[in-house]
Amino acid sequence: MLKEREKKLKIYLTSRDACFTKRKEGVLDEEVLLLTQQLLSSNPDFATLWNYRREILLHLETVRSEDEIQRLYEEELSFLEACLKVNPKSYGSWHHRGWVSTRLPRPDWARELSLCERCLSLDDRNFHCWDYRRMVVRVSGVPVDQELQFTDRLIGSNFSNYSSWHYRSTLLPLLHPGSPEAASPQREPPTSSACSSPSTSPQTHSHRVCEEQLLKEYELVQNAFFTDPNDQSAWFYYRWLLGRAEREEMISCVYVSREGERVVVAFSRPVNALSVGLLLVVDGQPQQVNWRSAHPRLRHSPMWICDLPPGTISDTSNEHNLTVHWTERHTHRDCALYTGRSESWCRDSATDLELFRSELSVEKSSVLQSELQSCTQLLELEPQNKWCLLTIILLMRALDPLGYEKETLAYFQTLKEVDSMRTSYYSDLCSKFMIENTILKMEYAEVRVFSLCEKNLSTLCHLDQLLLVTHINLSSNQLLGLPPQFAMLQCLEVLQADDNAIENLEGVYHLSKLEEVSLRNNNITQLSDLKILTTCPRLARLDLRGNPITQIANIQSQLAELLPSITELLL
Amino acid sequence: MAADNLPTEFDVVILGTGLSESVIAAACARVGQRVLHVDRRSYYAANWASFTFNGLLSWIDDNKQGGQSPEEVLDWSGKVESGEDILPLSTMDTSISNLEVFCYTSEEPEEDEEEKKEDATPISTLSPAPQSEGEEGNQATSPTDNRRNHEGETTLDILSESPPEQQDQEECAPLAEDQQILSSDGEPQGEEQLSGSAPTQAKKKKISYTKIVKEGRRFNIDLVSKLMYSRGLLVDLLIKSNVSRYAEFKNVSRILTYRQGKVEQVPCSRADVFGSKELTVVEKRMLMKFLTFCLDYEQHPEEYQDFTERSFWEFLQNNMLTENLQHFVLHSIAMVPRETHTEEGLRSTQHFLRSLGRYGNTPFLFPIYGLGEIPQCFCRMCAVFGGIYCLRHSVQCLVLDKESGRCKAVIDTCGQRISCSHFVVEDGYIREEQRKGVEHKHISRAVLITDGLLLQSESEQQISLVTVPPLEPGAPAVRLVELCSSTMTCMPGTYLVHLTCPSSGSAREDLQPVVSRLFTKPASAGEEGDGSDERPAVLWAVYFNMRDSTAADRSGYDLPGNVHVCSGPDAALGSDHSIRLAQEVFRQLAPHEEFCPPAPNPEDIVYDGDGGQGEGAGFSEAAQAEEGAAEEAEESKEKEASQESSPVEVGEMPDPPPAPLAEE
């Protein structure tokens, strides 16, 4: 046996060397085609030989008649089928097949589709074949409904298949588009802002599916996750079904500060303002300004800041009208700074935008309610199932984030127990939801105070929504630092973050109104950790009691030297 | 090989070409032993054989005459030396009894209404009592019977002369000729010739008996009905030994059951459960949960330890399974009687589930052209490695060494003395005197040719296993296997239905109640329009009992130590018993040799001298191995088979799909 293998290897190597020699010599004839064919049929993953073959075929195209070319390429396709039998996941073979199909004078797409069908029946997760098939479908224009039936069939034979589910998610909106009006009620114009803006729907509908079809899909996917609740592909599809809302790209807020002579613009998603064509017009005059993000580390940011040329708006006796144009998106937002006011803003708030529901669309709540019931039923049968727990949390968020807060926290606790490997992920997700809830509460109360103590926060997010906040209390959580995004709290005056594990103050950066910082019982160890505070000119009170840094000798004098503006230092 | 000119010395002489004997033959030849393999029958595979329709008729005839006619007892004293004894073998095959044939379809070539039979006429009834085998000969013969015999024989004159492979080769040509003659006569028109490709409308188009006989070669009717568990011993052996390359297989496509008066599909795989319209989502969850548990029930003894002394049935009831789920698990998945102990039930369920998903959505494979292919595949392997074959040839007696009591040689039917160190023999050749009170069981069998599927579906090509729980307490559970024409076992437009159960009475007594519930008779002239009865009609049926000799173990025979007895088929669905037996016998024959190691792949063989060092001299088309000629015969089959949906190749797939119940 060994001897036989050695012999085969020797023949193989001889042929390979012959091929390389011929290529060097620039031989492009059918004899070499045969030679490479013999090599490739025993080893179809030989990219160089496929390239050589394409060179030869391209050459032959120039010297042969169309019928001969057709025949040549058809033979090539048959040969490729043999290669795919050797290795159904050969990159080289599939790529070459795609190439041949596009060169073929009279392609036979039906044959290609049936080839894919056969391949997928052997291995329904062969992504090479999926890729190739998508190409064939695109070029040959297979009707969408036929393709949907195709996914029906594949999902029916094995629903553990991301490719099929995903394909379905691209087909459904084409075949059963939802009507844009149905799901997104118009909101009242914002009341808390100094001026109103044209209220546009926050969601676009390009990926929506009509409700009737949606109900069928819910049923289908429920069958899948009741059959096998541990299969994640069905759960992922379910999440897609529940949450297809997309946020419209827009300017969500314009804030202007008279004394700081500064304009802050917030966007619905992170952008790079330097490249999106942002234009500021003050009292009809376009301004030459330099946009900067809230923190130099944020190159894409939902918030951009510019300083106005001195004197543009500093006179309190005048009213000024500002407009920010986002030329790339043909959208803009106005903001009026009235006489005597020191600051002004114009925005859509988180509550206006139903912002935190965007993960799950605002479907008719009766539908979501019945989905919640099914999942709760499944949870009774499978109390340990993490996918089910997580989906219940998401459904509750979509239905009534504040009303279900208590249950949500309890389910998070269970999740951390049954899926301990992902405890941190769940902590972060829970933190996010808690922050969202607190933002909602703050908006409803129409205050600029954000307080979130003792909520086990492990991370901070949605900080762009806190632009107007003047007082923040994050005490008694598990924060390790204040990230760069924290610099988006442009109106912040008082920061309380006692009893965390903060060792990093990166985000306390150029907060021009910040006066008081309390960081008792944290993990600040070095003087250099506090250097960032020098960017906050008004900082007068700093509480560092209970931090390792207090053990450093001469710390008081060193701090006084570093931060001369501080009048009250507690160590 | 010419029977009267055999070599006189072998390591192993094997008598009988059933599954166990054939596997032993292949295993011995594979490790270099000299094997002589003979069978007194004219066909391979003994009671495992598959017949064309006409072949089956002739088999029925033979068995009606009480097995093979007794051969003339020769005087073999001249062959025996002093110090030797003679041990004669049986010349009668008495393994088949209670043969009954029924024809329900028109006997006439044309659809002649007057001739149509409303009721089944027992055409030949042989020994109604199970015990009195093969004594009464042709008692109940009717005129029609005579004619059938005549028809059967004329065709068989040719067939029985040729070994099975050649039959297949001949298949195409004469058939086409027949059709030409037919159409020139202006009898059955157009559609008949197309029947191979176009699905015939079975319900509307009547299929006459004449047509069945004419298309008889399209049938491959198994004497025993078994399926192959995808992870059973047989499939493993086929893969390991590379014998699988001699055959092709199809997945059983559905598991059905008979419940509350109707046939319904059993959701057993993950895909079935997912797709089921009958189960609620909660039932789906409960069933999947239970099945997942069964897959590795040994790991969770706490779940069933309270039930070890109680029945599986009670255990199921205690597991929050609804009544329909209990039925599915007990009858169709575990396939055990209610009183089975919990652990055995769990084991059976596990066996079923482990085979699921290896090749398809059910745990079972069926060999194209019938089960009879499988022993033949092993015979072919044996022949490839030098084994010598001789059909219609038998051993009359064993020559025993008086001193050691061992078998030294055998004397064949030509009176030739052939020495051997081991003798392997099928149970049916052993005389009653050598059995020490071995009580044989029996299998009740029925084979039906029907005109439609038991459960309609989108596709007419379905292979179904149907479990029918006991219709009344004490009755046996009956197993049906329904084969479609793409398995190459029946003509297009018909289905072949095999019924099997352990016997409690004659085959007809055991099985008729099930047949009459599930099937109807062909509608006669006036009834045509009445569509209320959707059951398929039986066109033709045969009932018989087959001896199940698997109960006997070695100690049950009074035979020399180097004579090894192989039992015939058992009533089980799988073939594990026969494979295990073959393995045990082989271990006694060749204690230090591997059992059926992989035969070298023809592609791995490089021959000296050819395929020089020149440019690309064909390593890809390495010469086909030695059995070129044998494969040619196979090719004609393959071509036909490949026109249908592609058959399953048994082997480890390069990238197997996930186990159906496992987490992704």
Image (spheres, coloured by chain):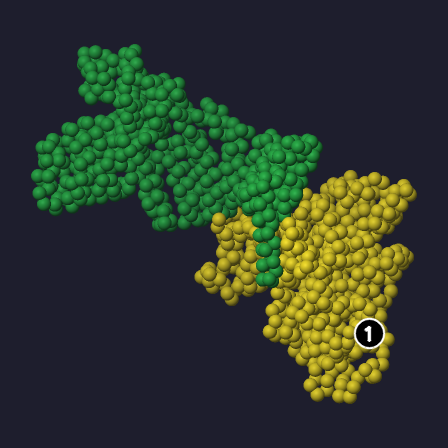
Chain colours: A green, B yellow
| Relative vertical location of residue B73 with respect to residue B381 in this rendering, above or below | below
What residue do we see at 30% from left, 14% from top? A286
Q: Is residue B592 visible?
A: yes
Q: Position of residue B72 (x, y in %)?
A: 86, 75
Left or right of B147, for residue B451: left
Asked whether, in this view, residue B611 is left or right of residue B341, the answer is right
Identity of the residue drawn at 40% across and 34% down: A359
Instruction: Check disc 1 and report the residue beneath it.
Output: B413
Instruction: Estimate the x, y position of residue B255 in percent, counting from the top left.
Output: 63, 51
Dot 1 amino acid type: Thr
**Quadrant location of residue B20?**
bottom right
- The quadrant where residue A67 appears: top right
Rendered location of residue A307, percent (x, y): 24, 21
Residue A168 or B273: which is nearer the viewer?
Answer: A168
Task: In this rendered view, identify the residue nearer to me: A190 or B622.
Answer: B622
Is B410 situated above or below B167? below
Query: Looking at the picture, how far across and down is residue A118, in whole percent?
Result: 62, 43
